[in-house]
Image: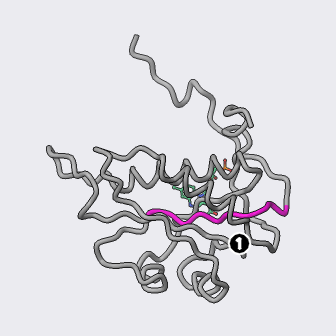
Amino acid sequence: MDFNEVITKRYSCRDYVDKKISEEELNKLLMAANLAPTAVNYQPFKVLVIENEDILNKLKEGTKYTFNAKNILCVIHNVNESWHRYYDKKDFGTFDSAIVTTHIVLEATNLGLATCIVCSMKEEVIKEILNIGDEYIVDSLITVGYPAESGSHNKRKDLNEIVEYYR
Ligand SMILES: Cc1cc2nc3c(=O)[nH]c(=O)nc-3n(C[C@H](O)[C@H](O)[C@H](O)COP(=O)(O)O)c2cc1C
């Protein structure tokens, strides 16, 4: 798919077909994640692949937004491995994870799959369910699957509302 088509077609899908994505598709998503740039190339993130039915169901205790997807990816970062800006100690791990998340959702769109980025979650509950250590921050859940609907992205602001020129 042409890149412009990919970014135009990506939308947040909240209704999936009752079927797991293929191993080949999953691997392509993980390769796209791995190619994401990270600050200082520290690569502080992990992608957790959740396909187990019991765990998928349990995740509902931590978020309302699983949409019964058969595949959920969880992007986390280790605060001891991420880049903290020297001047103010700001942790850029969540920024890294956001780019990883973007690579995944765009590659999924490229493959004809649909996704939704989900951050509305009880982080501590998700950590407990997935057995994630204290040194990690849970940055996103990504529901992935074959869309059961034909959706399109929400309306955006006009360019003149989001751009300021310093020419
Ligand atoms: C950081 C972030 C967090 C989000 N969290 C949720 C969420 O918890 N639940 C949900 O249904 N959608 C969530 N979304 C999806 C947004 O609602 C969606 O991207 C936005 O409404 C624009 O729609 P579109 O993706 O279809 O263009 C999230 C998106 C982002 C980028």
For the magenta stretch, what is the residue range?
Answer: 139-148
Q: Residue 150's spot in the image, x, y percent?
A: 85, 53
As displayed, is residue 6 above or below residue 56? Answer: above
Which quadrant does the N terminus fall into?
top right
147 within the magenta span = yes
Amino acid tagged 1: Ala
Q: Residue at x 47, y 77 (%)?
A: 122
Q: Residue at x 72, y 56 (%)?
A: 114
Q: Residue lying farthest top? A: 167
9 within the magenta span = no
Which color scheme did the rendering employ for the protein? Answer: one colour
As displayed, is residue 45 above or below residue 38? Answer: below
Q: Residue 165's spot in the image, x, y percent?
A: 44, 18
Quadrant of residue 70 within the rendered picture = bottom right
**Image side of residue 71 versus residue 16, left or right:** left
**Image side of residue 155 versus residue 84, left or right:** right
Q: Residue lying farthest front? A: 24
| Residue holding disc 1 | 69
Q: Residue at x 61, y 70 (%)?
A: 72
Q: Residue at x 31, y 51 (%)?
A: 92
Which secondary structure lies at badge 1? loop
As displayed, is residue 40 above or below residue 130? Answer: above
Quadrant of residue 132 within the rendered picture = bottom left
Assign the magenta stretch its main secondary structure. Answer: strand
Q: Residue lying farthest left? A: 87
Q: Residue 121's spot in the image, x, y percent?
A: 51, 73
Q: Residue 11's spot in the image, x, y percent?
A: 70, 50
Quadrant of residue 80 within the rendered picture = bottom left
